[in-house]
Amino acid sequence: MFQGSMVALVTPMDDAGQVDVESLSELVEFHIREGTDAIVAVGTTGESATLNEKQHCQVIRQIVEMVKGRIPVIAGTGSNSTEEAISLTACAKEAGADACLLVTPYYNKPTQDGLYYHHKAIAEAVDIPQILYNVPGRTAVDMQTSTVVRLSKIENIIGIKEATGDLQRAKDIMQQTDDSFEIYSGDDATGMEFMLAGGNGVISVTTNVAPRAMHEMCMAAMAGDTKRANEINEPLTSLHRDLFVEANPIPVKWALYAMGLIPPGIRLPLTSLHEEYHDTLRLALKKAGVL
């Protein structure tokens, strides 16, 4: 259902930490103009952890309205509370999102059975395509391949964002699930190899600042054109690394501010990028040709 370069969109904020709707609209237009294949609204990069449920739903609704059906909108609706995840997912469906992205429950460390029944409950409660999201570096829980395979048999669970960077794991999931089950990279540094190996795309932080190049790289990689994909990806490698010099989305929000695309606002407990990293990130943006 979805493929290519899917931006994990930042949520622009003013100095007081309030959502900047005008900048959000301009970002949406920037991505549509530059060829981004889908927008992921209010995921990790969109500061979902610091938006309350009302704000979370409001930003999803605003992005859907801004996009006007021109590209798919995938709403981040995960939570470590099954009840809250169901509520957010229902809100996203009502807002008109095309699918939902649901991170594995964080902090409370559920078992593999707990992960299965959590996602099963959400899928049964809300009839909208759902994408699993495994990112153990943030959640402290790792959804094993056997659990992914088990969940893939539920009709409206259509794919997974696999953010471990483990290419062998991605291949194992591909081999053990039906062809209709889509597999997306959640790791920019290995995204190209992931797609060359058969992945359906990347849900990307780098796409925030280099959307055109990321779209073209994804198209080449998914077509099996290794030479062209490498040519496009090479100038982006510093971004893939340096957009994580501090916790995401701190660096990418600073980068977009440096590019003149958003105001500098970010919500506590996150803080603005430390000055010692400014030159590093500015150099990576210049190497990618976006600054």
Image (cartoon, rainbow, N blue to C red):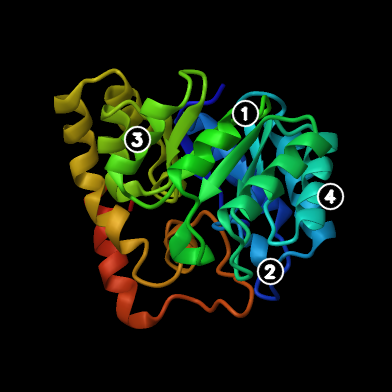
Residue at far left of view:
227
- Picture quadrant where residue 38 is located: top right
Sequence-first disc among 3 and 1: 1
Rendered view: 53 above or below 178 = below
Q: Circle 4: is it few (<14), some (14-19), or many (20+) Cα within 10 Å?
A: some
Q: Where is residue 205 in the image (x, y as percent from the top left)?
A: 44, 51
Tell us which disc is closer to us: 2 or 3. 3
Q: How far apart are marks 1 and 4 (CA)?
A: 21 Å
Q: Mark 4 points at which residue?
A: 87
Distance of label 4 from label 2 (alpha carbons):
17 Å
* Camera-side mark, 3 or 1: 3
The residue pinned by badge 2 equals 50
Q: Which amino acid does label 2 sit on?
A: Thr
Say which amino acid is labelled 1. Answer: Pro
Which residue position is annotated with label 1? 72
Q: Which label number is shown at residue 172?
A: 3
